[in-house]
Amino acid sequence: MGWDKFLALWCAVWGAVAVVGFVRSLAGVTKAQRTVRLTGWIARVREPRHGGSRTGGISVVVSYHDPASGQEVTVTNDGERGEMITSAWEGREIGVSHPRGRPHAYQFSNTPKESDRGLGWPSFAVFLVYVGLVVLAMLEWGWPWALIGFGGTWAVSGAVHLPGAVRAKNRRIEKLAAMETVPGRVVAVLKDVSVDQDDGHTSTTITPVVSFTTREGTAVTAYCTSNLPDPAGAYGRDVTVHYTPADPADFTLDRAAEQRSEEREVTFHVLAIVVLVATAVVGVVFL
């Protein structure tokens, strides 16, 4: 089988997968659509032990109302329970989900989520079809079509999303400026050591844990993975915390660094568009 026939088969198979996925979504029978989604709240927070592991996130006790029985259910996030809880305080709302008819298989998310239509895999299948078509065009008509297909398509996509990225950056900067400031303290430094099974290389992950109380009286415990100098030796250090009153999980120790990061992201977005446009232009020139 030649490459052209292989790629045609590739596109046909993944195209069929995409069609089946979209049909299942329209019929409301995808796994995501059959998932029961609830809103729970943190009833108790267990402070991480200094020198312990970050695996599993901050240990919490969560309560939610079971719609089937109407009773209040209390569970923990011990074990593999979905998203890692990295910021916790009593009363915080989080998402709780489980497959229909299997409440014991519950999963957590950091925020309550709307029902998902299950379009992730069908959309990925469409992307694979697109890749196959671009490669097929390159084989049939020459390599410049690969530059046009990839560079041009992604340049258009980047240009379409650029205004939204700029608006998101501006909203973020406004939110940073409106943050409240309170004292905090590093109450633990967590350490995780992993060993690569192939070459035996050892890597260490250091995760400081910050505790602070908002002006509204909410005691927050959160992982702090950025903008903290010498994180390994930060245990017991007093810090200044800037947080969003509506969501204390949105906090930083350095507002200026956060603002610079937002500016860099938009700059990178623009540079990426320029490179992609240039790639497409090179393809057109060499046709």
Image: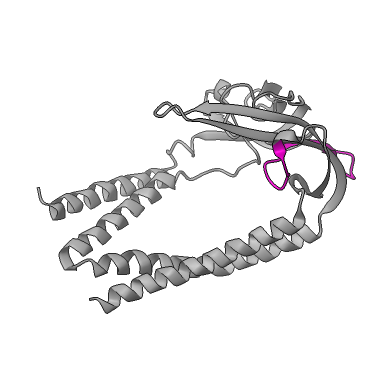
Drawn side of residue 13 relative to residue 74, left or right:
left
> In the displayed structure, would residue 276 be above or below residue 136?
below
Q: Which residue is drawn at 21% across and 59% down?
A: 136
Total marks in image: 0
Q: Position of residue 227 (x, y in %)?
A: 71, 48
> In the displayed structure, would residue 48 be above or below residue 240?
above
Residue 250 in magenta stretch = no
Q: Which residue lies furthest to the left in this view?
A: 1
Q: Residue furthest bottom?
A: 285
Q: Position of residue 131 (x, y in %)?
A: 30, 56
> In the displayed structure, would residue 141 be above or below residue 87?
below
Q: Residue at x 9, y 47 (%)?
A: 1
Res 20 quadrant in image: top left
The residue closer to the viewer here, 272 or 235, is 235
Q: Which residue is drawn at 70% across and 22% down?
A: 74
Residue 222 in magenta stretch = yes
The residue closer to the viewer here, 246 or 49, is 49
Q: Tell me if I can see residue 56 in this picture.
A: no
Quadrant of the frame with the C terminus: bottom left
Q: Tell me if I can see residue 31 in this picture.
A: yes
Q: Where is residue 229 in the image (x, y as percent from the top left)?
A: 73, 44
Drawn side of residue 239 relative to residue 93, left or right:
right
Q: Which residue is drawn at 22% across and 49% down?
A: 10
Which segment did they paint magenta? 212-231
Which color mode does the image show? Answer: one colour
Q: Where is residue 168 in the image (x, y as percent from the top left)?
A: 64, 62
The residue closer to the viewer here, 35 or 192, is 192
Principal secondary structure, stretch drawn in magenta: loop
> In the displayed structure, would residue 52 be above or below residue 203?
above
